[in-house]
Image (spheres, rainbow, N blue to C red):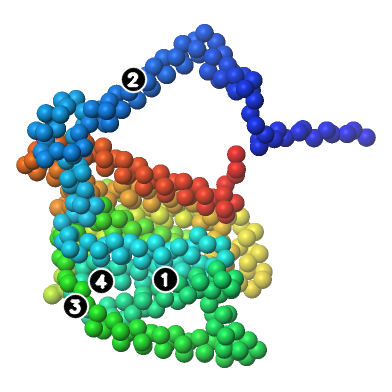
Amino acid sequence: MAIIKAEKTPDRSAPVSETSVMGWLHKNLFSSAFNTLLTLFTLYIIYLTASGVYGWGLRDATFAAENRRECYDYSLTGACWAGVIDWLDNIFYGRYPREEIWRINFGGLLLALWMAPLWMGRVKGKVLVGVTVVVFYPFLAGYLFSGGDKGFFMQVMVTGAIVAFAINMANMITGLTKNMGLNAFIIQMLEQGKAPDKTQRNILLLLLAIAFAAAFVWQVNWTVEGVSWTKWGGLFLTLVISGIGIASALPGGIILALGRRSKLPIVRVLSTGFIEVFRSVPLITVLFMATTMFPLFMPEGFVLNKLVQVIIAVILFNACYMAETVRAGLQAIPKGQFEGAHTIGLGYWGTMGLIIMPQALKHMIPNIVGSFIGLLKDTTLVSIIGLFDILGMLRSISKDVPWLGLHKEPLVFGAILFFIICFSMSKYSRHLEVKLSAGHKH
């Protein structure tokens, strides 16, 4: 009988010896005369680039000055970061009233707290957390940012957001301290653990109704000063447009992908036509069409501001691209998964929601995050139609009289900001792949 000897896997956790490092360098960088010359030439190019960037951006740079002329008085060859520092508030917040900037910061803090349970292993009901963020947070943040009078619909949605946030925080606390969900904790506290499921559900619904009524009464008289959307700008506006686009594009893409694969001819044709129309034109064309022709299709007296029109255009455009990403993920699922789901009695929506869609989305994480990164960068196009996003604000620095002609430094600063955001999204997508076992560790 033949005996197969298993190859011993090298221990990657063991310390790397100096000999192995030298061997790796010789094998990969200095294995021949040509490779040695190429390595030395590349290192020289890297040295020139790094030293030039360091000299321009740090050593000879000016960080404190009243205008561009003072930067030249200090150094003719260094960067003038003083103009960027002077415009930091505008870069991040646009022309938003300075005394109301706390509302933007508070909205960002709310979002961070709301989504914090998604990264905590002991917290239960994470899917519900994500749903409440998508459904309720935009209304609470939208009113917080814009202010003014609240209509009845906005009051209901703001109340729902307040209740959802409070429940989310309470659920996070019970998860971290008791290792159980909020609903189970409440039932345990009320000593109704042995009650029928229907009774437990009715108790939870009653408590939810009481909480909603109390929050509604509390927020009725809660008002903040109105801020026109025309004063929104900078990185804040970029994140608002891309954030709403990201939160809405994925659900919209899923619906369109399912519609394109539907067995109903009308649904399939309409979904396919909608997808192909939006994927056949550039985003800038869709933005121009949204701001010029969209009002023509609205009822008389119904007016949407330009920002809302742009957000709708971004959502529709990216939902069509996301639909093709989701459709590719659905096609990668073996047919046996569908058959197995039908065998255990699941219908269409049960099969899709519980079996097929989680697998498809898990395998499409890199493409989905890539689309999100593209969406974030594409939002800079809104500056062409008159919205002062971060790119518009960076361009405005060069038109300000004290910093007239300052072009390079603002654009470099903007590039660094976008790199940090996009790189963070990319690294987190890789973390999700490993966590969900969608990728392979190397």
**Dots 2 and 4: beta carbons under 8 Å?**
no
- Helix, strand or loop at disc 1? helix
Instruction: Kindly identify which numbered label has been placed on residue 415.
Output: none
- Helix, strand or loop at disc 2? helix
Give the quadrant of residue 6.
top right
Q: Residue furthest right?
A: 1
Residues at marks 1 and 4, CA–CA distance in whole angstroms: 16 Å
Mark 3 or mark 1: which comes first in sequence? Answer: 1
Tell me the amino acid under the disc marked 2.
Leu
Mark 1 or mark 2: which comes first in sequence? Answer: 2
Dividing the image into 4 quarters, which one contains the C terminus? top right
Q: Dot 3 corresponds to which residue?
A: 149
> Of residues 203 and 243, which is closer to you in this image?
203
Instruction: Kindly identify which numbered label has been placed on residue 132.
Output: 1
Mark 2 or mark 4: which comes first in sequence? Answer: 2
Instruction: Kindly identify which numbered label has been placed on residue 48.
Output: 2
Residues at marks 3 and 1, CA–CA distance in whole angstroms: 24 Å
Residues at marks 3 and 2, CA–CA distance in whole angstroms: 59 Å
